[in-house]
Image (cartoon, rainbow, N blue to C red):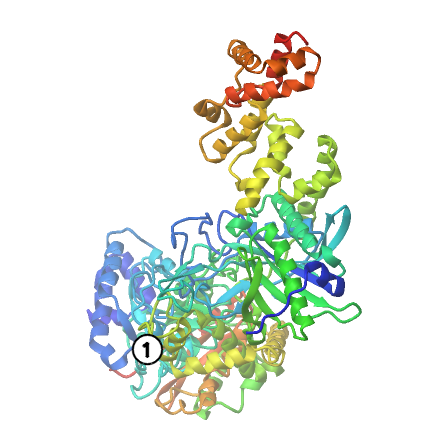
Amino acid sequence: MTTIALPSYEDATSRYETVIGLETHVELGTQTKMFCGCKTDFGAEPNTQVCPVCLALPGALPAMNGAAIEATIRIGLALNCDIAEWCRMARKNYFYPDMPKNFQTSQYDEPLCVDGHVDVVVDGKEYRIGIERVHIEEDTGKTLHVGGATGRIHGATESLVDYNRAGIPLVEIVTKPVPGLGELAPEVAKAYVAELRDIIRSLGVSDVRMEQGSLRCDVNTSLNKPGEEWGTRTETKNVNSLRSVERAVRSEVIRQAGVLDGGGKITQETRHFHEDRGDTSPGRSKETATDYRYFPEPDLVPIAPDPAWVAQLKSELPEKPSTKRARLREEWGISELDMQSVANAGAVELIEETIAAGASPAGARKWWMGELARRANELGIELSAAGATPAQVAALQKLVDEGKLNDKLARTVLEGVVAGEGDPAEVMAARGLEVVNDTGALTAAVDEAIAANPDIADKIRDGKVAAAGALVGAVMKTTRGQADAKTVRELILARLGVS
Amino acid sequence: MSDLTRLSAADLASRIASREVSAVEVATAHLDRIDAVDERVHAFLHVDREGALAAAAAVDRGEITGPLAGVPIAVKDVVTTKGLPTTAASKILEGWTPPYDATIVERLKAAGMPILGKTNMDEFAMGSSTEYSAYGPTNNPWDLGRIPGGSGGGSAAALAAYEAPLAIGTDTGGSIRQPGAVTGTVGAKPTYGGTSRYGLIAFSSSLDTPGPCGRTVEDTALLHAVIAGHDPRDSTSIPQPVPDVVAAARRGATGDLTGVKLGLVKEFAGDGSEPGVLAAFRESLEALVKLGAEVVEVSCPHFQYALPAYYLIAPSECSSNLARFDGVRYGLRSGDDGSRSLEEVMSLTRDEGFGPEVKRRIILGTYALSSGYYDAYYGQAQKVRTLITRDFQAAFEQVDVLVSPTTPFVAFPFGSRTSDPYQMYLADLFTIPTNLYGGPAISVPCGLSEGLPVGFQIMAPTLADDRMYRVAAALESAVGTFTPPAL
C-alpha cells in the first residue's frame, strides 16, 4: 500500500472547494415502538422488549404509532418544511440479521416532510442549510459479534442479536448539498448538528443524545477544484459527537485532497470515522451496494395528515432555539459569540435551568462552560451527561455566593458531585471543605504568618499594601486553602494597622 | 354418531344449543371421521384432538354461547394458532409453533368453535392444486386421483369429505373460491380489509384475504359473521360495520331475486372454459332468471390483463414478505456448522426450505422490483390494477353483481398442469380480477360436469358482501347441494 502525502487542512481548502451534506437519524422518544406496543427503554436486558410484530414472526403485521407521525411532522415544521398531504411508507429490502423482516419499513419517494431549512451562525455569520427531506422509518436491532481473536465480524465465532431497538421510530433528516463554505465547512457542519439537536430537543420528541445513539449523523463530503463540477462524495458514518462531526469533515477534506493531489480518484463509498485516531477508513463500497427494491408498503395505509391539524401543530411549536438564544443573550447580558459557544456546547437549557434554580446568569454559565464543559470534552460526552444537574450547579454557586466556598474549594466540591458523592452541601461536609470563617482561627494563622515574615510585615506597614499577597499565600497554605482570601487579606491589613 | 358429520353447521349449532347433542360429541364425530378418512384425503397437516375436545367441553359447560358455539372448524395452515404447529405447508417452517393467535383464530375461539386442526395447502398459498405442499398433496374427495384445488385444497377437501363442517381459507387470487368450486363446496372471499390479516402468514399483502368455507351458503355466512370486523392490529382492516351477511343469505334462500341485475362478464363467458363448465354455468344463470333476476351483459375490457398484472404484483410482494424466512429467528436453519458465514447459512436455509413454486415467485418478484425494471413491471401492473378497479366500478353502476364460472375447468388429475406454470395459473383466470379490485366474491356449487363439481362465481362491490350471499343462497335454493361419492 502506498502512502499518500497529506496536505495541511489550510493548504487543502486553499486549493479545493468543499461540498458537504448531512444525514441525521433521530430516535424518537415515543413510549412504544413504531409498529407495535413494545416499550422503547434504553439499556433494557436484550430481547425483553419484543413481540411478534417487531420480531417479524410469520403473520405479524405493523400498526402505525400515531405519536411517531405527529413527532415527525413537528420536526418537519420546526425545520420549515412542507408537510405532505398524502404519502406512503415504503419497504427497503435487504438481508441483514439485525433486521427482523429483512426489509426496513421506511419512506422512499414520498417523504412526510420536504424542502425546509435551518439557519446557523458561525463566527458571527449566518449560513442557511437547506433541508431536502424529513422522513420516518424504523430502527434495526443490534448485532454483537462475539468470540474470535479480533471480536470483529470475520473473526467472530458467534453473532448475537438484540431486537430491543428493532422497530423504534427513527426520523431521518437529509440536508441538501451545502457548497461554498470554504474552510468553515467543518464548523458549519458541527453548528448545523448542534442547531438540529437544539431544535429537536426543544420539541421534546427525543432526548437527542449522540453518545447513546439517539442522534446519529452521517457526513457526506466531496471536493472539487474551483470552477469545476462537484466531486465524488464519500459518506462518513460512526460520527458520534458534535466534535466528531467537525473532525470527520476536516479529516475527510485532508484525505480527499491528498488523493486528488496524487492524481487519484475518490471512490464513492461509506467510510467509518475513528474517534480515537480522528480519521476515516473505508467501509462498504457503494458500487456493489444492494439494490433495495423499494416499493410502497402494502401493510400500511397511506399517511394523510389533516391540513387543519398540521396548521394547529405549527401554531403550537415552541420558541425557536435561535429566537430563544437571542432572548436569553439579552437576559444574561452576554455577547453573541459567547452565546454561540454556549449553544454549541449544548448548554443553553442547562444554564437556563440552573438560573431557574436560583443561580446568577454569570455563576451558572461559569460552571457549565468551565469545569463541566472541560470534563465533557475530555470524555467526549454530552454536557448533560457530565455528572452534575442544574440544581446541583445552582446549589454549588449558592455556597460560593454565601462565602462558604471559595472558587478553588468549589471546584473540588464539583469534582465530588461529579464523582457521585452527593449534592454540593453533602460533598462539602463529607470532605470538610468549608471555608474557614472562624475569625479566631484565622487571626491565629495571620499572626503566625506575620511573625514568620517580619520583613514583609514591615513593608506593608510602610504602605506597600501589594506585598500583602505573600502573607495571604502563607495563610492560605496553613489553612489548606479553606480560607476566604479576601477575608484573610482584610485581616492582615487590619492587624498591621493599614486598613 | 357418524351422521353428525353430515349436518350443516347451522343445524349442529342449534342442536348443541338445545343440548340435543353435546359439543364434545360433535367434535368427537369429526375427529373420528378424520381418523377414518384422512389417510386417503390428506386434508390435514396437523390434528388437535385434545385441544378441540377441551374447547368443546367448555361450550358444554355453558362457558361460551353464540350462533356457532360448539361447531368445530378446520383452519388453513397459513393462519397462526397459538400452541399449534403452523407451517404454511413449507419445510422452512417445519416444527414452528406460533406463540400467538391470528385475530380470526381469536374470534373463532371466542365464538366457542373447537379447532380440529390445520389444513393442507400449496406452500405459502402459492398454487391451485395443493401439489406444491411440502407435505404431499390433498386428494379431492370426489375423485382421489384429482386435485382439490388450491391453495386451500385442504380446507375445501375437509368439508367435502365431512371431516369438518366449516373451514377457514385465505384468498389471494382465488385460493378459497377455486378449491370450493372443484370440491362442490362454498367459499367466500370477503371484501379486502373486511377480515383481519393479522396472523395470516403473508403471501401478497395487498391481495390476501381470509375468508369462510362451508358446505352451504348459510353456514358460510354464519362463519363470515364470526370472523369479520375491524382489527386495529391490521392497518388495512376497514372500520366500517360488517354487512349482515346471514340475513342476506336467509333472504336469498327464499328464492326471490326480483329486481336483481346480474352482470354477465362478456370477457369470461366464452372461450377458455371447458364446455361442461360453461353448460352448468348457463343452466344456473337460467335458474336465476326464473327466480326473477335480470341478466345484463357487461364488458370489463381490462380483465384480460388481470392475470399478468397479478403475476407481477403478487410475486413482488411475496419476494419481500418471505424475506423474513432466513433461519435466524425461527424455523429451518441449514448448514450452521461453524464453517459457513451468516450469509451462506441464510442462503442455504432458503434454498433447502422453499419449494419450486415459491422460489419461482420470489425470483419473479425480485426481478420485477429491481432498479431499472420497477416501472416497466411493478409500476405498470399497478396501473392495470387501477384500470381493473374502474372496470368493476363502471360495471356496478349498471348491475348489482357480476357472475362468471369460478374456474375454467373441473378438478384435473394430479401432475397434469405442474410442468407448465401458465396452465396452472389459468385456474385463477376468473377469480383474480376481484382480488385486484378488492371486492367480495363467492363460489357456489352449481352443477356437475362429467361427475365433477362446477362452481358459480358471484362478485359484488366492495363492502357489499351481503349482496353476493343473497344471490348465492338463491342459486343454492334452485340447484341444491352436491354430495360426493362415499369414500
Q: Residue furthest front?
A: A455
Please state the horizontal and vertical placement of residue B275, each as a whole percent of the image: 46, 92
Secondary structure category for the residue under label 1 = helix
Residue B297 spot, x, y in % from top left: 59, 82
Which quadrant is home to the C terminus of chain A?
Answer: top right
Closer-to-camera residue (A477/A179)? A477
Q: Is residue A429 left or right of residue A381?
A: left
Does B15 sit above or below residue A410?
below
Tell me if B118 is positioned left or right of A49 in this view: left
Number of dots carrying numbers: 1
In the displayed structure, would residue B368 be above or below residue A50? below
Which residue type carries mark 1?
A: Ala
**Label 1: how many residues lie within 10 Å, few (<14), some (14-19) or many (20+)?**
many
Which quadrant of the figure contains the N terminus of chain A?
bottom right
- From the image, tell me which residue sits under label 1: B157
The residue sitting at 48% across, 55% down in the picture is B232
> In this orientation, does residue B270 appear?
yes
Residue B359 against residue A404 in the figure, above or below: below
In this orientation, which residue lies closer to the viewer: B153 or B339? Answer: B339
User: Could you say which is closer to the camera, residue A438 or residue B29?
Assistant: A438
Q: Nearer the viewer, residue A113 or A271?
A: A271
Residue B466 seen in this snapshot:
no
Q: Where, by quadrant of the figure, is residue B136 drawn?
A: bottom left
In the displayed structure image, the side of residue A178 where residue B8 appears, left or right: left
| Percent x, y of residue A403 | 58, 19
